[in-house]
Image (cartoon, rainbow, N blue to C red):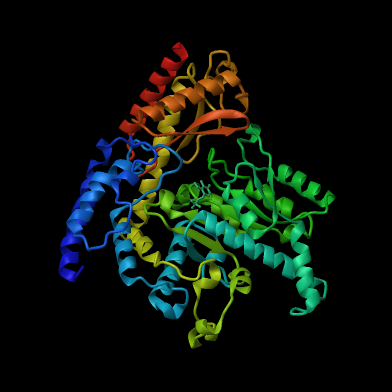
Amino acid sequence: MDSDQFRTAAHAAIDDIIGYFDNIPNQRVLPTIEPGYLRPQIPSSPPQDPESWASIQEDIDSKIKPGLTQWQSPNFMAFFPATVTYPSILGEMYSAAFNAPAFNWLCSPACTELETVIMDWMAQALGLPECFLSTSENKGGGVIQMSASDAVATVMIAARERWVHGQAKSEGLKEGSAEYEDRVMDLRPRLVALSSSQAHSSTAKAALLAGTRYRSIAVSLDNDMSLTGAELRGMLEKLDEDKLTPYFITLCFGSTNSCAVDRFNEIIAVLKEKPHWQRIWVHIDAAYAGAALIADEWQYIAKDFAEGVDSFNLNMHKWLLVNFDASLLYVRNRHDLTDFLDITPAYLRNPFSESGQVIDYRNWSIPLGRRFRALKIWFVMRSYGLTGLKEFVRKGITLGNTFADLIRSRGDLFEIVTKPAFGLTVFRVRAGSNTNGALVNGSGEGALVQPDEKADAVTKEVYETINARGEIFITSTVMAGIYAIRVVSANERAEEKFICRAFEVLVQTAEEVLRK
Ligand code: PLP
């Protein structure tokens, strides 16, 4: 493809993309194809001869679009949103054009330097404590990772190394000696990573990757599924008894099931109770809900991270208008990463890196090569301004509150399981027999909701019927033994009329299933 052909093709692609976005509200949110639909439509072997862009683009319409789940549809109310905007797409285009796998500063100084500036912008925008800024005295700073899963795996590996090396050194062993190496290896099998049972599975997976044990701490509906200080203390004391060594904990700022927020203050106070608990790396997973910090009224939460928190992670690609991938990871002390993740063969050496004056982000993450992701964040922040970003997040929260109120208005049909938060409502369908919540407060929220097999079965049927019909797309979950439906409407095209229609669909389907 030469530059003239590229110009023509790019214009056609952009027109097509704009048409795609404009038409999304008219599209069915879930595709109607069956598994394996694509293979028979695509030649079984690669083309021998070049093809024109026109024929390639034609296949987007006929073969790809029919197999897309419409994440940008206002009827997409499943999982968490995955937002995308035009400025973000422009950022991707430039990033592809510059195509610099910027592992070292020298690989493309602009990639590294913009990332550092943008991460500081975002830290300020979120009201994060000063210690997470790259300019902080404690050498904090941020790095853009691909996903929250990469972020937690990276910090967990660093935490493991920080713990075992710290221990070997504290025992007076000489770094580099055989005894030191043996000790570092011998310590690993007793290490345990922790989180509440509500943390995303990426923490358990990270423990697998880090080669350490993992324990999840049970939480309850009485506390709205948040991890409390007492629950953590119980687990830590048990680990002490079992001679196991906790070295890492993920705390939820917006759990996947219900947007639960762990009790940061209490937990940090418990970790101070014993010297060896103080060595535990504390990671905040704010993958989705952390976006709320952009709005001033939520920033009080971030004040809890000023002390005792080692890392904080937020996915802009969920709720902050930047497309996948844009996962912001902040650390209090960059040396916690760079001391353990820096492997420097001769071919990576250069005077700038050796000078210590520049950041080499390869030492802040697992992969060597990395994409120029700061561009799209920069474009989005400038195109929306903080005013636009705040407005967007507030809209999602308001829509969530409206939806929760609608659900409450039909206390005869539904009961809310956990306190609605950050645009997410988690509820189940009443099966007739279970009306205890309604009798007490008309909504049956939180601890009032009890496991009930009949309600589970009805809720599951309502959920499956709705998704099979495909007008809206929602997700279900199981929490504290309760089968529940989750609805979140926080993508760019979300609007009250769609939320109201989703409520109608839920009412009609619940009534239909209950009539049966
Ligand atoms: N943490 C939370 C709270 C999530 O909800 C998710 C995914 O939805 C993740 C982590 C994992 O995100 P990623 O796909 O960026 O790894």
Residue sitting at 65 percent across and 55 percent down?
Answer: 207
Q: Is residue 294 left or right of residue 204?
A: left
Foreground residue among 409 and 259 = 259
Residue sitting at 49 percent across and 16 percent down?
Answer: 412
363 shown above or below 75: below
Residue closest to the far bottom: 351
Quadrant where the C terminus is found in the figure: top left
Residue sitting at 49 percent across and 57 percent down?
Answer: 127
Q: Is residue 450 left or right of residue 1?
A: right
Foreground residue among 347 and 115 = 347
Residue 425 location (% of width, % of height): 48, 33
176 shown above or below 230: below
Foreground residue among 111 and 390 = 111
Residue 416 location (% of width, % of height): 52, 27
Q: Is residue 143 left or right of residue 154?
A: left
Quadrant where the N terminus is found in the figure: bottom left
Q: Is residue 18 left or right of residue 451?
A: left
34 shown above or below 240: above
Residue 52 location (% of width, % of height): 18, 60
Is residue 122 visible in the rendered structure shown here? Answer: yes
Residue sitting at 47 percent across and 56 percent down?
Answer: 126
Is residue 492 visible in the rendered structure shown here? Answer: no
Residue 251 location (% of width, % of height): 61, 50
